[in-house]
Image (cartoon, rainbow, N blue to C red):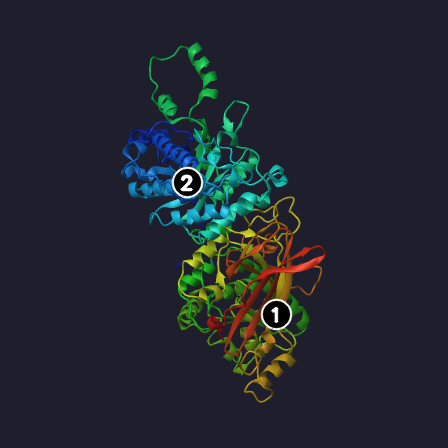
Amino acid sequence: MADPDQPQSLPQDIPTALYIGHHESQRTAAVTPELLGQANLAGYDMLTAPLTTPHFQSRVLTCLEEYVKEIKTAKHAETLPLPTIAPLLPEDTDLGPDEGNIAIIGVVSPWIDLGSPDPLIAHVSRQVFSLEVAYAAFVGIGNVIVHGPIEGSDHVQYARAVLEGLGLGPYVQLQILLPITGELELEGAEGAHLSELAREKYMPAPSEEDEAEPELFGTWETWNTIRAMGQYSNKLTVALELPRQLPSLELQSRWFSEPVRTLVMPRTTFLRNQAGYPVLDKGHQQLLSRFLRLKFAPWVLLADVDPIEAAEDALGQSGPEPTPAEAASAASKSKAADTLAHLRYMRRLQQTQPSRPPVEKFGQGYQDYIQSPLQPLTDNLESITYEVFEKDPVKYEWYERAVAVALKDIRAKLGEDKRPIVCAVAGAGRGPLVTRVLRASKSTGISIVPCAVEKNPNAHVLIQRRNATDPLWNKQVLVYKSDMRSWPGPTIDGKVNKVDILVSELLGSFADNELSPECLDGVQHVLHPDYGVNIPQSYSAHFTPISTPRLHSDLLSRSGEDKWELPAVVMLHQYDDLCRGPTQKNGQMQSVVFPELTPEIKDAWVFSHPIPEAIIAHAAHRAGGTLDAGGFTGGDGKNEHNVRTCHTRFSAKNRGICHGLAGYFESVLYAPEDRKLPPIELSTNPITMDQKSKDMISWFPIFFPLKTPLYVPDDAEVEVTMWRQTDDRKVWYEWIVEVYQKVGGKRWKLGGSVLHSSRTNGCLM
């Protein structure tokens, strides 16, 4: 068992995994086992391969041309059935079943147009698409790249075809090849593109929009249509092409939140350094590093850079030793002719990735993993759960500082009264806070009576043993096995005493979601009426709308309908903030992936302790239902003073999809009596975390999901109403999200969620 008294070391960085593939837009050589072997020797992990040959393209074009001739000469063209493409022939494809196909990414013919406005072209394209994807599934190719819709293509028709393709093989993953914005830079299809054969009567008339600059988020909008039609299938991902000039960080962050399976880097993505070798600029390096921090990092596809055959020649060259003059000449030429320069550079980047932040090291394997919040009042935690939280390098240090300052303040208030100060840890667990209280007493030289209260019978055994064996505890800690709400207070010299400092660590991911208010109200009777202080003294909940396709897809795959009503604890990583404040110039939020982008995070509510005695007395009078008709949502209403509600408005500059709310908390452990001294605080709020409790790892954010994602247009407003409810037996949350936009001086409601409520699965008191 780890010693909770000692600083716990964080896990080391795991080596960065980077799988690199090779793509040729117009690959002429068949991808054979021999070619795969050459690629592997060169250092590539995979190759792309066209699923069909030029022979198949020629056959399709011939079929199409014959049909067009037929309808031109037919008297009743509308009665002719649409043409059908015969199944693949041996000469139509170079691929066959092979165990090496696991290293092949199939490429659907780029010359088809699945969303063509001409029903003939769309019909033929769908047949080609189905034949090729089905054959890829048959020969064991698990990943298939499909070129995204071309200009003028119907995105909904395209998306419908892709949806059908998802069912053509149980293990086939479709990657939609899209530019990050604008148009693809990869070379197009060789030969005629079917879109060029579309009949004029089906082509839309030119408009001014055709001449306009492409919208920044236009490509993402296309992907959103495809993804929504595909019902967030985890078999549908993006192959994202990176251009030479990266777009704004806002768009980069959006794509970061999407299921990008492959980053495609054409030759044009790279610059040349002074020595003539290919390199990425700092912006591309940073974006790559961000993607490589994901739990499932995307692959990298080097496109149209260096032919594999040339790389083999470079690796296999042998001959007599060159003369010094020949060697010098060859070295100067190799800078421009190094056939593995791009690959070598990417491998070098792989080995020089920056270290991950402490919270990521701590949460390795838990990125975007949905967990239910703890219910410490009804469940007795396991030792390993305590041990995980005791690894925090910041939290307990901050608690010790808070106790030390509180001891000094109370000692000053007591004046001539030299009695020991009574310090109790309510919910002591395995005792780490007790240790910190004892250290604070030792460092300040102020004598205390330490107490530990714990309801978990198993943890109670451990802290009794620690009291008997730990030299710092030295049998001086008064240990009580009790629910803190039933504890009468410490017995000192035969008399029940009050507590001067009541320390607890009951905070949840949303501050109050583990019932800290209810627990501290219940134990407030032991607090000294004149000098008593709580640590923490207050805590507040905060939230913001986010886009997180990954979590939404995860929830869709789970059974039951109550999954949409359950706030979940999640180490949020692959997400995008929909609403933002002013951009950070120096990237001050080092705890997030895009520190330059500041989320707009609003306050929900605050709890402070101790609460006024009048409120405690009124709650006691309501118990039993003798005072009034009872609580609004059930029960006697004795806990109704802990009900909260908020209504907040956020501004969204860029369009997006709201999948739910990310929740955080801030807490004032202790504010010194000397107001010139700063308060000692904890925070998981990304805006204030680095300032208040940098590198703290004990809490992940909380996620409030939406059953139906909400579309948020450019320059919209997102309104959130949230409640903390109670019926005296449990506490639950309710939330609703609405979208508005101002048009022509009027404010229009564009959509809204249903009311979500965790009442069925509330936190039991």
Mark 2 or mark 1, earlier in chain: 2
Q: Is residue 424 above or below residue 741?
A: below
Q: Is residue 55 left or right of residue 460?
A: left
- Please say if 749 is above or below 217: below
Disc 2 versus disc 1: nearer the observer: 2
The residue that mark 2 highlights is 125
**Residue 630 placement (x, y as % from top left):** 57, 84
Amino acid found under the numbered disc labelled 2: Ser
Q: Secondary structure at mark 1?
A: strand
Which of the pair 63/280 is nearer the observer?
A: 63
Secondary structure, mark 2, is helix
Label 1: which residue? 645
**Residue 284 rendering spot, x and y as whole percentages:** 53, 36
Q: Position of residue 719 (x, y in %)?
A: 62, 61
Give the residue type at disc 1.
Thr
| Cα separation between marks 2 and 1 | 54 Å
Residue 404 is at least partly visible in this image: no
On screen, residue 309 versus residue 619, left or right, reads left
Q: Residue furthest front?
A: 75
Q: Is residue 467 visible?
A: yes
